[in-house]
Image: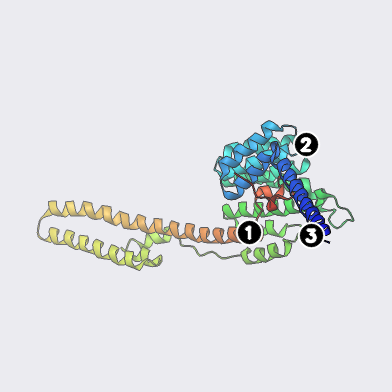
Amino acid sequence: MRRFVVVWVALVVLGWSGALSAQESLERRVYQGPETGLLRGDAFYYEGDYYRALTAYKDFLREAPDDRRAERVRLKMAWVYFNVGEHGEAARQLERLAAEADDVIVGWWARYYYGQVALASDRRPLAQRAFEEVITTCEPYVARVGEPTDDPEIRECLELSSAATLGLARLEAVRHDFDAASRRLRAMPGVSPLAGDAAEIADLVEGLKIPRKSPALAGVLSIVPGLGHVYLGQYGSAFVAFLWNGAFIYAIVDSVLAGRYGQAVLIGLVESIWYGGTIFGAVGGAHRFNRDAMRVVEDGLRRDLLELYRDEPWPARFPAHPAYLELSIPF
């Protein structure tokens, strides 16, 4: 009996050791070769260490330039360049991929992200053209949504078309053309999961009356010092303008009545500068009021659009390894 127990324990220990050896062998295979650079690149990206992520991705491309994932790695690199503020390099990489990628899905995403980079760089015509190209390219695939097929291009195109439509709406928000932004949102494909929420945002924006102040009226009212600022709701500035201009005018009149004409001229010169500043201050205040009102609406619309669709971090779309999230990477 004792011999049987000893043999059984030995078999269990040997089996456990064999399982550990198999696991270690799997981990060694994962961490050896170019796969290591890809895993490290994704890990560095999630940690926000973008420059080390770029180095890791470059190592992968140098070691495995013909790997089937090479184009997707270049797409990751372009997005990392965008995150570190190198918009020019990101745009060059994306434009090249959009034109030359053998993987059509990579090409579509490259064109969409080229629009994102152009919008962030205030290259609005380029952004509009890129988003519209994505929508036009994906239109035949979006029309096939619901067919009994597992074609990945249909799924990718539905997401891309929806994201590009939101990109165009954001572009119109930057231009402060909120009615156009509403029309863009209503053009969302009806089969998109975002269509309902996009229509709700469009309802809020469409016909929105944004408060405005007339710079011309503010200037005319400021002929009476302080009235222009009262029109703008700047009561403290109105009181100061009325007080100082009143004091200068009183000093001028008093100097003239006392026969001190030279003094009156000098005070009059100072008053003319102050009086002109009061008028121009009211005009500038009206412009700032209008600009800030537009910006509040723009920021609110852009925030709603970002909450409606937030793209996942790029490595998550094309992870280096299916079991990436379960792996602990030794550095």
Badge 3 is on which residue? 191
- State the SS at label 1: helix
Amino acid residing under circle 2? Asp
Residue 177: quarter of image:
bottom right
Residue at 66% x, 42% y is: 76
Whole-percent x and y of residue 272? Answer: 26, 53
Q: Position of residue 236 (x, y in %)?
A: 32, 67
Q: Coloring scheme of the render?
A: rainbow
Three-letter amino acid code at the position of disc 1: Leu
Within 10 Å of the Cα at label 3, are there few (<14), some (14-19), or many (20+) other Cα atoms? Answer: some
> Which-is-in-front pick, marks 2 and 3?
2
Image-based side of 36 in relation to 122, left or right: right
Q: What residue does disc 1 label? A: 305
User: Which of the numbered marks, if any, corresponds to residue 177?
Assistant: none
Residue 94 point in image, percent of width and height: 66, 39
Q: Which residue is mark 2?
A: 102
Alpha carbon of mark 1 to alpha carbon of mark 3: how far?
A: 18 Å
Measured Cα–Cα span from mark 2 to mark 3: 28 Å
